[in-house]
Amino acid sequence: MKGGLKVSQISLILIGFVCATILLLAYVKSLFLSSSLLPQNHVLQLSPDLRVKDEDALGEGSGSEQSVDSVILESEKYPTYTNSSPVIKVTEELVTHEEIGGIVPNFTENGDLKDVSDKKSGSIEQLTDVSTLVNSGNEHSENLTITPERRDCNLAKGRWDIDDSRPLYSGFGCKQWLSSMWACRLTQRTDFEYEKLRWRPKNCEMGEFTGVKFLKRMQNKTLAFIGDSLGRQQFQSLMCMVTGGKDRPDVRDVGHEYGLVQSRGSKRPDGWAYRFPETNTTILYYWSASLCDLTPINPSDPATDYAMHLDRPPAFLSHFLPRLDVIVLNTGHHWNRGKLKANRWVMYVDGVPNTNKKTATIGGAKNFTIHSIVNWVNSQLPKYPHVKAFYRSISPRHFFNGDWNTGGTCDNTTPLSEGKEVLQDESSDYDAARAVRGTSVKLLDITALSQLRDEGHISRYSIKATPGVQDCLHWCLPGVPDTWNEILFAQL
């Protein structure tokens, strides 16, 4: 046709059209394949540097019902799929420490800690794990740095560092809460380097403890220490930490609400309870050296022996558990023949004198009791889901060349002469670790980190110094028990 397209031109157009169609189909197919392969190959990865940032500190005396401590979990960098893929940034708010670090230790039958670190670093499942940490609770963690490999954040593994901002309260103050026998600033001691040490976990950094943060986190709640005199030290330490060692005439003594009143003829009550009115927070201590129930065998006889029920919790704990929100249990140093004889304690199991030879040994009885009480608490937690329960591992003694009554000493005043790091993952208190394994009771593991602090004991510097007698069991305050409370605060 005149003026029309030639056959050769039409052929070129058709060929061009076909080629364009093939290229378009290939491009669409490549997009489809890349999108479908992403979840299979788990290409999306979380940055190994996840940081939780602190919000402004609360104002003193704030009466707000809802905590304004909030944190931001922020991943700064992610690997890209291709050189041209965009960088993806995820920001989440309100990440609670319980969900980051509240993993119950998982031990083997030999008592060793299983590796609970997440080996799937860089997986889509890992992104899901972080997303599930987000909630709208009132309890948040501050200044906590974690890694994908160790999201459980082992607070008992780390090192002691010098920190000139310590201590958290004055050793000359806190007279309202601190027993003078444990206030080493009031004794003849002249070295106080031990007050400057701060515990730094290896896999995360604990946020700075303040009384304001603690009271807001524990608003309308009750924390109870139940145990021996080391539990009492932890209780007094926390009272000093929360108040900054300042007198607080507004804090109410509510011991009568828990039966903690001094009876006629006794040197002291069985414990103390105090309430902070601005947040309705109660902190109490109940003395139970054996952590088991004690009942008089013959109530009508003033000189009666006492049944030491190895399989029963203290009556105080079983009665008041519904009213408590956090419990910290401990026992250990009263488990010796001398103490049992002096206290006239007779081992009972199932309501009758114990006849099991294995349980009759001091070590067997102690372990049986710890397991029994932890299991009882664990059985109660479903009934009272608001309760968080901790068993505190044993506080180490540092008697050298004898015991407390045979010339044992702890004269070292050089901090960290035995070392400054804890490198092990498992607890040094194997009995405590085994007891909490498989339960919802958490281990407050303070044994190994305290083992490095032999210079922190009362030593020979007691107010009523007795020649040849040193206290290498209890600690100077301020001192090591303050760290126990910082770790407890991080786990709440």
Image (cartoon, grey):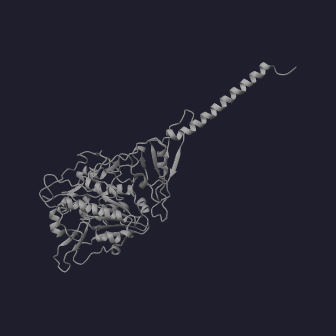
Q: Is residue 296 shown above or below 285? A: below
Q: Position of residue 313 (x, y in %)?
A: 29, 67
Quadrant of the drawing holding the N terminus: top right
For residue 27, which quarter of the picture?
Answer: top right
Picture quadrant of residue 189: bottom left
Is residue 369 left or right of 407 when viewed as pictured?
right
Q: Is residue 302 above or below residue 119?
A: below
The x, y position of residue 334, in whole percent, is 20, 63
Assign the C terminus to one quadrant of the image.
bottom left
Name the residue: 13% across, 52% down. 401
In the displayed structure, 183 sits above or below 44; it is below
Q: Residue at x 40, y 45 (%)?
A: 118
Residue 7 seen in render = yes
Q: Residue furthest bottom?
A: 300
In this rendering, does residue 462 appear at all?
no
Q: Is 262 placed left or right of 343 in the picture?
A: right
In depth, the one of 382 and 452 nearer the eye is 382
The quadrant where residue 85 appears: top right
> Farthest right residue?
2
x 13%, y 60%: residue = 405
